[in-house]
Image: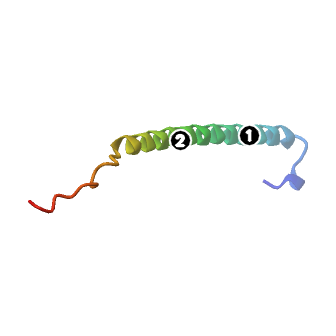
Amino acid sequence: MDVSSLAMPDIAGLSMYMARNETLQDVGTALLSNALDVQESVGAATVSMMEQSVNPALGANIDIRA
C-alpha cells in the first residue's frame, strides 16, 4: 500500500491496517516472550537434572587386583 497515493476516504482503511499490524506485532511479541520463558524453565530443569546425576566419587578407585 503506497501512502502517497491514498485519498481521504482511505485514511480509515490505513488506520485499520495499522491497528491490525500493531495487534499482530503485539501477539507475536507475547508468543516470543512465552516461548523464551518455557525455554528458560526447560534449561533450568536440564541443569538441575545434570547436577543431580553427577557422582564425584565415581571412578576414583580402580581395583587392579581382580
Question: Left or right: 52 with respect to 13?
Answer: left
Along the line of sight, the residue nearer the viewer: 4 or 32: 32
Q: Could you tell me if the residues under marks 1 and 2 are in contact, i.e. CB atoms within 8 Å?
A: no
Q: Secondary structure at mark 2?
A: helix
Work out which residue is located at the far bottom of the displayed protein and give it.
Answer: 64
Of mark 1 and mark 2, the one earlier in the sequence is 1
Q: Position of residue 27 (x, y in %)?
A: 64, 37
Question: Left or right: 50 with respect to 13?
Answer: left
Mark 2 lies on residue: 40
Q: How is the image coloured?
A: rainbow
Q: Which amino acid type is shown beneath numbered disc 2?
A: Glu
Q: Position of residue 4 (x, y in %)?
A: 89, 55
Question: How many numbered callouts?
Answer: 2
Along the line of sight, the residue nearer the viewer: 3 or 18: 18
Between circles 1 and 2, the one closer to the viewer is 2
Along the line of sight, the residue nearer the viewer: 57 or 7: 57
Q: Position of residue 3 (x, y in %)?
A: 86, 52
Name the residue at 32% across, 46% down. Answer: 55
Q: Position of residue 58 (x, y in %)?
A: 28, 51
Disc 1 crowd rating (10 Å Cα; few below 14, some 14-19, many 20+) is few
Name the residue at 84% across, 43% down. Answer: 10
Name the residue at 75% across, 42% down. Answer: 17
Along the line of sight, the residue nearer the viewer: 16 or 63: 63
Name the residue at 70% across, 37% down. Answer: 23
Mark 1 lies on residue: 22
Q: Which amino acid type is shown beneath numbered disc 1?
A: Glu
Quadrant containing the C terminus is bottom left
Q: Secondary structure at mark 1?
A: helix
Disc 2 crowd rating (10 Å Cα; few below 14, some 14-19, many 20+) is few
> Whole-Å distance between the Cαs marked 1 and 2?
27 Å
Quadrant of residue 49 within the rendered picture: top left
